[in-house]
Image: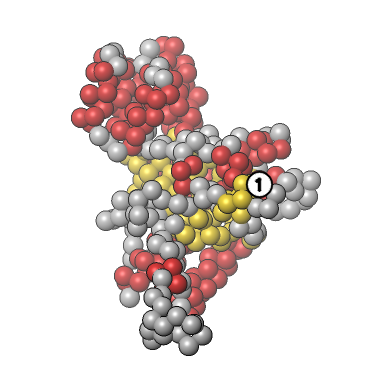
Amino acid sequence: MGDRDPGMNHKNKPISSEQKWIPDGFHFLGPEESKNRRNLLQSFSELFEKEGYSEITLPSFDYSNSFRSQLQDGLESLLVAKDWDGNELSPGVDLTLQVVKGMAARSHWEENQNVYYFAKKIRDHKKRNASRREVLQVGVESLGNSDTNHLISQIKILKKLWDNTLPNKTFTLVFGHSSFFRTILEILGWNEEQTNVLRQFLYTKNLPELVSLAARENTSETHMQIIQLLLKPILSSEMGVFKKTLETVLSKDELLKVKHDLESITSFFEVWNKEMKGIFCIFDPALVRDLSYYTGFMFQGYVEQDPEPVFAGGVYNDLYASFTGIQKDACGFALHLDAIEVMLNKEK
């Protein structure tokens, strides 16, 4: 590229960085990368269609308030623009929300409620260069069913996808349970601000800060035991031990509050341990960093030497009703294609 542009009157006019570069966190794919991505997506489509899921297409933008009304965390990631009418619009920062909202608007249509999509997730980030701001998300959602068997059936699809794409790489599944975690936080009886700090320390397993926080709040001995229980990930085969420990730590009234969720968790892992022996998994009671609209099980998938999850999913039984007033259980998962592509490129 020369220093001069013959179409300009000003000689040696400097070219601004905005003209030279794409913004941090956004990406241009050339012909070869685009072809590889297309082939990958085609293989995913074929798998999802074979499993009875239909493709949907999401809008690039939605009303900013649509995201604000549903998300407890991550709102600082929302990019906001205004249209000519003064409406605030944002690109999709949470694609599950857009799927459910879109399908709910067509609730009178008789359509397949098992769907999949490929869509760009766009988010801002406080730390420069700390995160991709544009990722291609692959998502699978089921509206109308979120029981144990259905959730496990989705994880089986995820496993097939993974084995077809990265057969030499194994992942670990980490489960959490949103409703159980919420109830435990209620039992501790801390206010919202204290709870938010506690959640962050639990998620990062920061024991010194947790002990310090608990001391400042005059936490009772039994409640301190509860907090310590939340810190320990449990093997799926040891859920019975976890349940017994909880029963010794919690009072009768407290046990009554978690009874339903505890039964749900233990019965899920009974089925899991019979059917899914090929996947290493643990239950982390404090997995839930972002509670938002999740109502039951949540899971994240990790690979060695990567602190960020490569996929995530869960149960969100109340989300559909928030758009229509009609109760519809739902569950799904999503993975970031960019992370998969990075791993594939390392294998070449």
- Foreground residue among 8 and 317: 8
Residue beneath the point at 24% across and 29% down: 209
- Foreground residue among 106 and 46: 106
Does residue 244 lie above or below 165 as drawn?
above
Give amino acid for label 1: Asn
Q: Give the image location of residue 319, x and y in percent.
A: 61, 38
Residue beneath the point at 53% across and 65% down: 44
Badge count: 1
The kind of secondary structure element at disc 1 is loop
Q: Give the image location of residue 106, x and y in percent.
A: 75, 48
Q: Is residue 340 left or right of residue 34?
A: left
Tell me if I can see residue 305 in this picture. yes
Quadrant into which the N terminus falls: bottom left
Q: Is residue 82 left or right of residue 292?
A: right
Residue beneath the point at 65% across and 42% down: 144
Tell me if I can see residue 234 in this picture. no
Quadrant into which the C terminus falls: bottom left
Residue lying farthest to the left in this orientation:
208
| Mark 1 neighbour density, 10 Å: few (under 14) some (14–19) many (20 or more) | few
Quadrant of the rendered image containing residue 270: top left
Q: Give the image location of residue 275, x and y in percent.
A: 45, 47
Q: Give the image location of residue 277, x and y in percent.
A: 38, 49
Residue beneath the point at 53% across and 68% down: 41
Quadrant of the rendered image containing residue 140: bottom right
**Applied colour scheme:** secondary structure
Residue tagged by mark 1? 87
Q: Is residue 172 left or right of residue 82?
A: left
